[in-house]
DNA sequence: TGCGATTATCATAGCGCTACGATTTTCAGC
DNA sequence: GCTGAAAATCGTAGCGCTATGATAATCGCA
């Protein structure tokens, strides 16, 4: 009861809502040590005497203490969070990378903050802005193209940045990935080596998916250099799905009379092509050879099994994690070390 | 000047590393208002006079101020973070839910902290422990079964919890999903309605994937009730992949002589069955009817198109987001409102 | 036993922000 | 012009933890 009797106005100390029931202070009291020692024990157990350590461990267990990383992050001026921004987690490529990355980082006690840009630079900038608000230990972006605002924010922040899934330009800081035009070129050369001359590249959402567009242009260039008779790039405005593949095949058949080779920007599209060919009685690889990209789950098992290019999404995840960890604990990653090429692998199967 | 001449030892104020170049204080100074007003403006712009608001906005722009959510979270005793724990983001089901959830939450200024339990309760507990360290606004878990430690942690924390993708038990707090035994039963009844009597349920990783196991047992039960002649549940120890489907089909053919109906715990497995049947010249649905689960990307387009059960992963995401938002801003969600059934839909196509 | 060198522990000042309560300004209504 | 209520603004005490530098305890060796 705060009935201030009389004139003297005794100012009651301000009450603040407690967020944490058990604090480090409570642990320290129970373990009969100072809070500093508890903090030290939590961060470097070997720096605390075994006796004290045991006492602290016991106290933590007894109280059910859960450290408050928010407070820790504020005090230490850097949180144990890594922010990852991908175009879409629905895309199996990125799902694989994010999954691997998350596991690798979790093993080192780092959390993953996830965001989807939906292939939009403005969206990405907004996500980067919020991400920076968390003083993350590192930020992972997809691709090398970002809005000027994004670049400015990141440069000003001084946070380590890894750009993944694309190589070929100058990264903001570090980069892990591979060269997409080269992927397109590999696909074209493979088809040409099989004697195919009337080629098509079937892609989806290439107006937004910069990397798919790069694969297409690498394909076109290699077609020209390799003496293809026809080479069309056909784009589906919607997402890369099996259905998009069936639609794209039909457009390709219309546009290229003697179509005999198809490269797809995604194995899902290639699967759609396979199904549609089966429906129309087009022999694969007899009449048309098909090569995909992604080496997804079904690619080895479909009929015919799909020749494809594997981008190694999990390897990218591993390497990104490695760069992040070394740039957190160690010195800055410099020079050629900053850029890691995970390459691509062409896997030849029955469809070509 | 605080140069204490003579012996008096004036203690220099400790220097601390600055993490933030621009703070709210800097904005306040430039805008000629107090820090409180800036804070207020950032949280409720309408509570600040237009003049002051404009001045503050200008200052923020000029300085490139990025608020520090870590400090904010500490002061406000709750961070704008929602922690999501799924078994695996590689699984298309969860990828869809997480994607939708992330978008919905981002629109309200909430961040997503992601973790993978890999179907392990101990892993999940560790993730929950770290998640709680961030004083999240809410925690989203997959399924209803958790270790006692996880339950205790969550109950003690008082953080809103949503369990998703499973219904049928008592949730810790809130739940969004559907009943898996009913899914299995729907599949069985569908096959029985097509006159099939020698049935198999093909599942993967059911020793860990509790929900797939529930679908299997619902299937078995409905088989019994519906007068099936044979009904085998066959489990593949590895992940649910297309290849698992081919392996499982062969085991089913061995175990059930007159096999004429197959339900799969996942459309990827069903796709493998489709391919393997095609290889072996088994007519679908002529000889064997196949029903899947998931309604994945390819399910409508494959040959024959796949009858399947759609779990509505995006709807789950939307509903989870709704529950979280209302439990953050509003009162506690009570009673029947706490449990949302998103149901399942059987989509009949050519494979049955 | 004494003394410098380690090793273990401690006390305390913030990290940047928000909640709270207080204070100031504005503006009807008379 | 005065008054009271409403609106706008302000001052400041923490939130729980870590970094820092200082102090206390322990050890090796002459």
Image (cartoon, coloured by chain):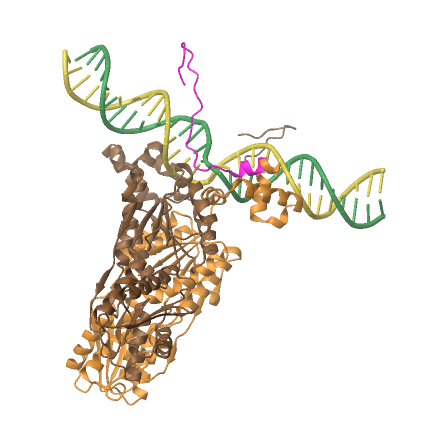
Chain colours: A orange, B brown, C yellow, D green
Between A132 and A57, the one lying in front of the other is A57
Between B73 and A169, the one lying in front of the other is B73
Above or below A50: residue A184: below
Between B99 and D5, the one lying in front of the other is B99
Where does the image place residue B329, in percent across and percent down from the top left? 30, 39
Above or below A323: residue A288: below
Extent of the magenta region: A1-29
Q: Within the image, what quadrant is residue A184 found in?
A: bottom left
What residue is drawn where x is 25% and y is 37%?
A: B54
Left or right for A37, reference A262: right
Magenta stretch holds residue A15:
yes
Between A208 and A4, the one lying in front of the other is A4
Q: Within the image, what quadrant is residue A345 found in?
A: bottom left
Where does the image place residue C19, in percent across and percent down from the top left? 37, 32
On the question of residue A190 being in view, the answer is yes
Q: Within the image, what quadrant is residue B67 found in?
A: top left
What residue is drawn where x is 35% and y is 67%?
A: A93
Where does the image place residue A65, in percent across and percent down from the top left? 51, 42
């Amino acid at each position: 009861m705060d009935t201030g009797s009389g004139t003297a106005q005794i100012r009651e100390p301000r009450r603040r809502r407690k967020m944490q029931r058990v604090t480090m202070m409570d642990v320290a009291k129970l373990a009969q040590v100072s809070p500093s020692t508890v903090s030290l024990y939590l961060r470097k157990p070997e720096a605390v005497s075994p006796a004290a350590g045991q006492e602290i461990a016991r106290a933590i267990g007894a109280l059910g203490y859960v450290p408050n990383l928010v407070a820790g992050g504020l005090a230490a001026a850097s949180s144990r969070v890594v922010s990852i921004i991908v175009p879409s987690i629905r895309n199996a490529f990125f799902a694989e990378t994010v999954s691997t990355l998350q596991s690798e980082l979790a093993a080192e006690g780092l959390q993953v903050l996830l965001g989807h840009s939906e292939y939009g630079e403005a969206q990405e900038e907004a996500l980067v802005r919020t991400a920076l608000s968390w003083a993350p230990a590192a930020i992972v972006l997809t691709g090398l193209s970002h809005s000027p605002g994004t670049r400015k924010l990141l440069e000003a922040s001084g946070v380590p940045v890894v750009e993944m899934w694309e190589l070929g330009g100058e990264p903001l800081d570090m980069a892990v990935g591979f060269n997409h035009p080269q992927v397109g070129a590999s696909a074209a050369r493979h088809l040409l080596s099989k004697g195919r001359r009337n080629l098509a590249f079937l892609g989806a959402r290439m107006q937004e998916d910069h990397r798919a567009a790069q694969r297409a242009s690498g394909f076109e260039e290699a077609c020209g250099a390799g003496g293809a008779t026809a080479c069309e790039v056909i784009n589906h405005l919607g997402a890369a799905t099996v259905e998009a593949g069936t639609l794209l095949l039909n457009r390709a058949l219309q546009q290229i009379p003697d179509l005999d080779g198809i490269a797809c920007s995604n194995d899902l599209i290639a699967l759609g092509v396979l199904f549609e060919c089966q429906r129309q009685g087009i022999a694969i690889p007899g009449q048309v050879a098909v090569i995909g990209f992604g080496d997804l789950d079904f690619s080895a098992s479909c009929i015919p099994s799909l020749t494809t290019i594997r981008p190694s999404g999990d390897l990218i995840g591993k390497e990104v994690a490695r760069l992040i960890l070394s740039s957190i604990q160690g010195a800055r990653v410099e020079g050629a070390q900053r850029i890691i090429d995970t390459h691509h692998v062409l896997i030849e199967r029955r469809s070509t």
